[in-house]
Image: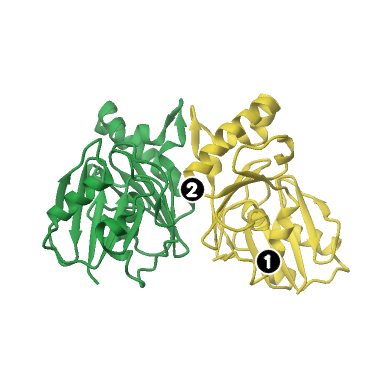
Chain colours: A green, B yellow
């Protein structure tokens, strides 16, 4: 079964299909509608062959349905029929959840995506539990995302951002009682060293997650 | 199968066995050892009949093994052989986890125990995930437990404590992407009103959890 994976990120749409070695990057925009996204995908992947599609969406998803309109894109995403528009069976999950699935190496794992925002997901007892830790209050009315996301990195600089990673990630590791934490997202590469019980992931693993969504032996149930 | 449930709380040890209508309360102490606890239990329950035992322990537990010595009791708990001491098969879980199992009403649930400390556990996808949210930093270097636990209640008073409950619980509900939050522990009764998506639990449900640990149809897997 050949899978087309669509990773809708904070700043671009990335595509990879089974058998390809290089991802395709499409521009995104703050008024991007799902119709427009599907058009761009069909245009870019016109001569590709795929049987099913996986989509990583930058917001909460449950039971293959988008729950909330995206923060940084256009409208019309909630209720959009991707299966019909793409003409294939589609599985949609939260983007951090998709990368979490791709990063999973067994046992109990907390995934934190260090990107534009702070993505999060838990995989435990063989199942995916999407999370939204980004907006939990952390300090002085600010949130974890304010410190660990792109804005926090820009505002305080790399050194202070790394210090916050080393402060917050171990706190989450203890709070979730997991075996390890995977740090993914675009900024994971800015960490020369990693906190204890942590492994480095990366955005490329989002595609692995998209492939695993259709693999019944992946070891991760997605309800 | 008759179960004896032992709930080791912050200030006392509570017992209930299958068929009993009233719990038995035994004193605890800051130097309580597991040997001493077992003695007191055997003395109190001398003529009770039970086949198996469930223990709710005030600290992290994994795979039926206590991971950390208790904060407010004596030493010797890690590695103690409860099965041998009690002469019965024993299942041990974190005390908040046991109350969570007893409070569970299906779907995805976050449990928060409002007691001496702040207990927490997640039940999702049919499985228990123990948590330790108490010590996550919340504000100005203080933790969630500093605000929602007994000390926070004493220091700031009931009105401010309730305000914090109404601030923090919805934040956790969103962060964990669960269907509902159960507020248990001894101080849940201080809430006349409940935040949205919240249900009231209580310490009595710890015993229900202890019974459910031995029920293969409970709907909650404990790894």
Image quadrant holding the C terminus of chain A, namely bottom left
Q: Are marks 1 and 2 in contact (CB under 8 Å)?
A: no
Horizontal side of residue B194 vs A137, given as left or right: right
Quick one: quadrant of the N terminus of chain A?
Answer: bottom left
Q: Helix, strand or loop at disc 1? A: helix
Q: Which chain hosts label 2?
A: B
* Residue B76 can be seen, yes or no: no
Instruction: Check disc 1 and report the residue beneath it.
Output: B82
Q: Residue furthest front?
A: A84
- The residue carrying mark 2 is B177
Q: Nearer the viewer, residue A188 or B38?
A: A188
Residue B45 visible, this angle: yes
Front residue of this view, candidates B74 and B24: B24
Which of the 4 image quadrants contains residue A88?
bottom left
- For the point 28% across and 41% down, the residue is A115
Residue drawn at x 25%, y 51% as measured from the top left: A7
Find residue A218 and report its image quarter. Answer: bottom left
Q: Secondary structure at mark 2?
A: loop
**Residues flagged by tags 1 and 2 on a common chain:** yes
Mark 2: few/some/many CA within 10 Å (<14, 14-19, 20+): some
Q: Position of residue B86 (x, y in %)?
A: 74, 69
The chain identifier of the residue carrying mark 1 reads B
Q: Is residue A50 left or right of residue A77?
A: left
Could you tell me how many numbered marks the image carries?
2
Q: Residue at x 29, y 38 (%)?
A: A74
Work out whether residue B32 or residue B204 is closer to the camera in this orientation and state it: B204
Mark 2 or mark 1, which is nearer the start of the sequence?
Answer: 1
Where residue B106 sits in the image (x, y, percent)? 60, 58
Report whether A4 appears left or right of B127. Answer: left
Mark number displayed over residue A42 = none
Frontmost of labels 1 and 2 is 2
Is B165 drawn above or below residue A180 in the view shown?
above
């Amino acid at each position: 079964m050949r899978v087309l994976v669509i990773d809708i990120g904070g700043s671009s749409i990335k595509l990879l299909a089974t058998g390809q070695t290089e991802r395709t990057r499409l521009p995104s925009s703050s008024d991007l509608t799902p119709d427009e996204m599907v058009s761009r995908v069909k245009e870019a992947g016109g001569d590709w062959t795929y049987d099913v599609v996986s989509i990583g969406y930058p917001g909460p998803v449950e039971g293959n349905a988008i729950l909330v309109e995206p923060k940084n894109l256009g409208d019309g995403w909630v209720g959009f029929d991707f299966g019909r528009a793409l003409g294939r069976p589609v599985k949609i999950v939260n983007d951090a959840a998709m990368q979490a699935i791709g990063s999973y190496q067994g046992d109990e794992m907390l995934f934190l995506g260090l990107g534009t925002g702070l993505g999060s997901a838990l995989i435990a007892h063989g199942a995916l539990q999407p999370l939204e830790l980004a907006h939990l209050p952390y300090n002085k009315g600010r949130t974890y995302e304010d410190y660990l996301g792109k804005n926090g990195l820009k505002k305080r600089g790399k050194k202070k951002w790394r210090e916050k990673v080393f402060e917050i990630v171990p706190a989450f590791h203890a709070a979730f009682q997991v075996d390890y934490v995977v740090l993914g997202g675009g900024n994971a590469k800015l960490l020369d060293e990693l906190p204890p019980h942590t492994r480095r992931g990366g955005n490329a693993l989002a595609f692995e997650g998209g492939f695993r969504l259709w693999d019944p032996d992946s070891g991760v149930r997605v309800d």
